[in-house]
Amino acid sequence: MRKSINRTASDTTKPFNPLEKKHLGESVAIALLTQEKHHLPLQHRFSGAGIYALYYAGDHELYRPLSARIDEEQDEIPIYVGKAIPAGGRKGGLGLDVPAGQVLYKRISEHADSIKQTTNLKLQDFYCRYLVADDIWIPLGESLLIEKFAPLWNKVIDGFGNHTPGAGRYQQQKSSWDVLHEGRSWAERLQPSKKTVKALSESIQKHFAEIERSK
């Protein structure tokens, strides 16, 4: 069963506007959630920009609340949601009519490589859904999905989507994600984090407890 995009009571008391930004974002998010699931790494290259959601179905103790939902066929909650836009969009423009190339495929593949390098995660325990979309709708869809699902690696454990720092930028601290999941070679060159595995684990437990209370 897929997670629905719920509307609040106030949404039903005002005229529905299909062109309202929120509803446009909803249509993109719903389109993603109906896409086929793919195990990582992706087996076939494709072109286009878009949004994606990563899901965890393994036995890591910290993430058991996520995989348990899959085992019990409950509403799936992604562990991470992201987007990939053409270079023009990353430089501050919308990126309209800029050839996207294989940016979405490459972004998901980068994530697969990050997971593969860790010492305590298995790539075969992850799968994803992705949606190739026109550039202008991508940020809307991503924002709505993050707001709706509060994915753990977006909201609590930062750093999963980080890239190798440029020259001279290794003075920054190791991210929370790299503290929990050691292995990325470039991350080992960063400064030690002030956050401990114990503190981060408690933050994860609190996050899942809040999700249960909100059901």
Image (cartoon, helix red, strand yellow):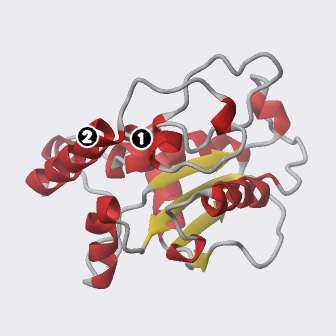
Are the residues tagged 1 and 2 within 8 Å (C-beta)?
yes
Residue at the image point whose x is 61% and y is 43% from the top? 161
Cα distance between the residues tagged 1 and 2: 9 Å
Could you say whether the residue bearing mark 1 is in a helix, strand or loop? loop
- Is 2 located above or below residue 100 in the figure? below
Rendered location of residue 147, percent (x, y): 36, 42
Which residue does the numbered mark 1 point to in the structure image? 157
214 or 99, which is in the foreground?
214
Going by the numbered disc 2, the residue's amino acid type is Ser
Q: Is residue 124 left or right of residue 90?
A: left
Which label number is shown at residue 203? Answer: 2
Q: Is residue 11 left or right of residue 39?
A: left
Number of marks in the image?
Answer: 2
Could you say whether the residue bearing mark 2 is in a helix, strand or loop? helix
Reading the chain from its start, which is encountered first: label 1 or label 2? 1
Rendered location of residue 105, percent (x, y): 76, 61
